[in-house]
Amino acid sequence: MLQQILELFSPEVRLAFGQVDQQLDTFSRLNSGCPERLREAIRYSLLAPGKRLRPLLVLAACDACGGLPSTALPAACAVEMIHTYSLVHDDLPAMDDDELRRGRPTCHIQFDEATAILAGDALIPLAFQVLAEGMATAEQARRAVLALALAAGATELVGGQVDDLGHQFGEPSLEILESIHLRKTAAMMAVSLKLGGLAAGAGDEALSALENYGKKLGLAFQIADDLLDLRGEQARIGKKTGKDEVRGKLTYPGILGVERSVALAGQLVEEARRELSGLGQRAAGLQQLAKFFVERTY
Ligand code: GRG
């Protein structure tokens, strides 16, 4: 499926996307002051075979705004670092207590809990370092660092995670569920697109269109994630399925049922696509991508 997705984008996006793993490798070599076991744990999680969807959003948004996607590679790596830290911490016994991630033992199983916590911790400043050093101008770097700090912070990613943990076995409410996923999942997608736009020097109108698209996309992605947990194959997804029900998690199929969840995902995809209409033909790849996001099987 990834190959099919990549074909939606320009050769420049594909070329830059092909460099993401190599760049992540370079950025995570770290200097000799980093303890070896910490370096290993950081690289174990960061270089594991994730889908790299957020980096793709960064590069595609940069292209859609008329920029050269390779200039957005540091931003693409920065969002993947924050995303990876959030997965490492989410998998810890104190949170989701998972043993499988990206088809491999989770970081705390492969190493130990303290190392997994600290590897996640170290990825956060590394992301901001890469972003601050990698944007073309000081003003772009300032705006990008601010945007990522807000998206990854206490009101968005972390706040969404806290509310998600707090509502296990809670009163099912679509409003709460949407608020959780707008912050836990959609905010990181929206900021990925924004950073790509910033790297291209896009104006405020284009930036807010990209962010709105990212929020709708993130919600649709989450519905697909809930549906995969319910009926996906563990081997294909690379993580355990059927956990949401056991943990009493609020989910879209749990509240709406499968049919209405599928319909809502479709509606969100249409709304997301419309958000990009002002960007014209250059955003056609991103518009198509939205469909793949909800039709995914892993
Ligand atoms: C610990 C602050 C903190 C936050 C954790 C990311 C997250 C918040 C929780 C992960 C739980 C989860 C299943 C969320 C659903 C959406 C999501 C982020 C899925 C994982 O992203 P993918 O499918 O993963 O893009 P890969 O491995 O391909 O990068």
Image: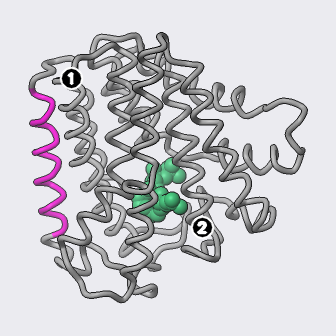
The quadrant in which the N terminus is found is top left
Between circles 2 and 1, the one closer to the viewer is 1
Q: Earlier in the sequence, mark 2 or mark 1?
A: 2
**Residue 281 location (% of width, % of height):** 16, 18
Secondary structure under the numbered disc 1 in the rendered image: helix
Magenta part of the protein: which range? 261-277
Q: Amino acid at mark 1?
A: Asp
**Residue 283 location (% of width, % of height):** 21, 24
Q: Is residue 145 above or below residue 178?
A: above
Q: Is residue 214 left or right of residue 243?
A: left
Look at the image and name its color scheme: one colour
Secondary structure under the numbered disc 2 in the rendered image: loop
Question: Label 1: how many residues lie within 10 Å, few (<14), some (14-19) or many (20+)?
Answer: few
Mark 2 to mark 1 CA distance (whole Å): 36 Å
- Residue 91 visible in the picture: yes
The tag on residue 97 is none
Residue linked to disc 2: 91
Q: Is residue 102 left or right of residue 3?
A: right
Q: Is residue 4 above or below residue 12?
A: below
Viewer-closest of 25 and 149 = 149
Residue found 17% across the figure and 77% down from its top: 256
The quadrant in which the C terminus is found is bottom left
Q: Amino acid at mark 2?
A: Asp
Viewer-closest of 233 and 239 = 239
Residue linked to disc 1: 204
Residue 204 placement: quadrant: top left
Residue found 50% across the figure and 19% down from its top: 16
